[in-house]
Amino acid sequence: MTTEIILLLLRCFSGLLLTGVLVVLFLAMWRDFRSVAGVVEMRRRTYGRLVVIREVDGHEVVTGETHPLLALTSLGRSPTNTVPINDHFASSEHALVAMRGGQWWLEDRNSRNGTTLNDLPVTEPVVITQGDVIGIGQMKFRLELETP
Amino acid sequence: MAAQNADSPRRWPFESLLLGLSAVFLGVNFLALDLLRPGVNPLSRWFPLILWAACAIVGKRVLDRRLPGHDPVIFPLAMFLSGWGLVLVERLSPFFAGRQTLWLGLSVGAMLLAAALPHLLRWLRQYRYVLLVAGLGLLAGTIVLGTNPSGQAGAPKLWLGFGTIFFQPSEILKIILAAFLASYLAEQYPAMRAAGLGGEGRRLGLSPRVFGPVLLMWGLSVIILVWQRDLGMAALFFAVFLVLLYIASGHSLILVSGTLLLLAAGVIAYREFGVVRLRVDIWLNPWPEADARAFQIVQSLLAFAAGGIFGQGVGQGSPVYIPVVHSDFVFAALAEEWGLMGVVVTIVCIMALFARGMRIGIQQQGRPFQAMLAVGLSTLLAGQSLLIMGGVLKVLPLTGVTLPFLSYGGSSLLASFIIIGLLLRLSASETGHAVHP
C-alpha cells in the first residue's frame, strides 16, 4: 500500500521533471534565438541607399523610391531578392551589389538582358562608387553611400 | 535565478540546470525501480547512476575549461537522453546495465577527446582518404568476418566480435563518411557556388563533378544494402549525402533525383530481397500476421496504446513482450512507461539537438568544411532517430537502426557521443564571418 503511494508520487514527480526539462530547454533556446536575432539585426545595418531614378527629357528625375543598401544586395524580379524589381526586362536573379575588400562591386548574374553601369554593359564584376547609375531593364538605380 | 541573472545578465547556467534536472529525474526513476525490485545488491543497482553523475560532472568541468564558449544545450541533452537510456536498460534487461554503463563512461571520454583534442579537425581534413579507406576496410571486414551477438542464424551480421565485446563498424563509418563528404564538398564549394555569382550559370548542376559522387554514394549504399541487409544505414548514408550535396550546391534537382534514386533502389530491393519485402508488407498491414512475423511491430503499437498520456510508470508496464525491446524498440518501452509525455520530451530533445547542430552550421557559414560537418553530423543524428521512431510507430517501414543515446548498444552510444563532441567543438571555435570570396 505505502509502496504504491510512493511509486505514484515518484511517477508524478518524474512527469513534473520531464516538463521541467522541456521548460528549461525552451527558455535556453528562446534566449539564444533572441540574442542571435539581435546580432543579425545589427549586421543588417545599411551602408547607403539605391535611389530609383527615371530619365525624363534627358534629365534624371528621382522617383522617390529608394532601397537600403546591404553588405550583400541582390537585385532581380524574384521576390526573394533584397531589391525586387517589377520589370519585364529583368531576370529573376539579375545582379548583385556586394561589399568586398572595402569596395563595392557590381556583378551581373548572367541575366538575359544584361546590366549596365552608367549606360555601359557590365560583362564582369566592376568596382562602383558614389553616384554611379546601375541600369536593369528599364529601371535605373543611383548608388548613394553613407559615410560611416 | 534572478540573483544569477543579475550576476551575469548574458549567461544563464542552463547547462547546470539541465544536468541537475536530468540527475533528479534519473534518481527518481532509479528509486522507483529499487522499490519495485527489492533485494538487488544496492551497489550494482545504483552503479549506473553514480557513473552517470561522475561522467556529467567531469564532462562539464572539462568542457568549461577547454571550450569556454561551447553550446550550453547539447551536452546536457546528450547526458539526459543517455541517462534515460541507462534507466531503460536497467529496467528492460538488467543483465546488460553494467556493460552499457561502462560504454557510457568510454563514450563520454571519447566525446571529450573529440571536443578538445587539438588539430583534430585538420587531421580529419588532411587524412580523409586514409580514414575513408580504413572505414571501408572495416566495412569489408564486417562483410567477411561479421557476426551477430545474438548468434541467430540468418540475422544480419553487422558486428565485429572480440571475445565478449561486439562492435558495429557502420556506426563509426557514418562519422567518417560525414567528415569525408564535408571536406570533399568544401573543396568543391567555390566551383559549385560560382553559379551564384554570375559566370557559368546553372548548367554546372548537371556536370559529372556533381553527379559522379552521387552515383558513387548510391553505389556504396546499395552495397551495404545488398551485402549486409542493413536497410537503415544504407538509407541514412544516402540521405545525409543528399542533404550535404544540396547545401553545398543549392540545386534542388539533387534532392529530387536523389529521392527518385532512393525510391528506385527501394523498389528493386522490395522485389529482390525477402527482408525488405517482409518489412514493407508488415508496414502496410501488420494485422493478419500479428502473432507471427509482425508480432514485434504489433506489440510495439500496443505498448504505445498502453502508455497513454502519462504512461504506466517505470517498471510498471510490460514492454518486455516486444522482442529485442532494449535496442531497436526502446522507444516503444519508453512510450509505455512514460507515455505521450516521455515521447514528446524525447522528440523535442532530439529535434533540439538537430536545431543546435544546424545553428552551429549557420554560425560557421564562412567556413564550408566546418559548416557542412556540423550539418552532416546533426542530420545523421536526426535522420537516424526519425527512421527508428517512425519505424517503431509504423509510420515508416521498420529499419533496424538504434535510437541515438537511448537504445542499448555500445557502438551506437560511442558514435553518438563522438558526434556530440565534434558539434561542441564546432560550436566553440571562433566563427568565420568573412564573406566568401
Image (cartoon, rainbow, N blue to C red):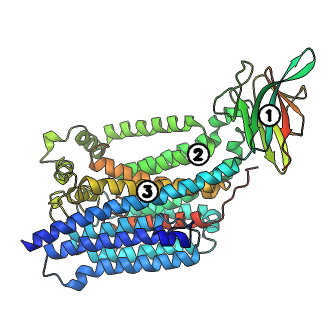
Mark 3 to mark 1: distance in Å?
41 Å
Give the residue type at disc 2: Ile
Q: Chain letter of disc 2? A: B
State the image quarter where residue B314 is shown: bottom left
Instruction: Report crowding for label 3: few under 14, some 14 to 19, many 20 or more residues within 10 A (C-alpha).
Output: some
State the image quarter where residue B363 is shown: bottom right
Q: Is residue B8 above or below residue B183?
A: below
Between A113 and B276, the residue placed more toward the observer is A113
Q: Have a look at marks 2 and 3 and say if they share a chain.
A: no
Q: Is residue A144 above or below residue B36?
A: above
Q: Chain letter of disc 1? A: A
Q: Have a look at marks 1 and 2 and say if they share a chain.
A: no
Specify whether residue B145 is in view.
yes
Residue B18 vs residue B178: left or right? left
State the residue position of label 2. B247
State the residue position of label 3. A26
Q: Is residue A128 above or below residue B115?
A: above
x, y percentage for residue B179?
Answer: 56, 59
Secondary structure at numbered mark 1: strand
Instruction: Report crowding for label 2: few under 14, some 14 to 19, many 20 or more residues within 10 A (C-alpha).
Output: some
Q: Residue at x 75, y 38 (%)?
A: A68
Mark 1 to mark 2: distance in Å?
31 Å
Point out the frontmost of discs 1 and 2.
Answer: 1
Residue B376 vs residue A97: left or right? left
Specify whether residue B167 is in view.
no
State the residue position of label 1. A50
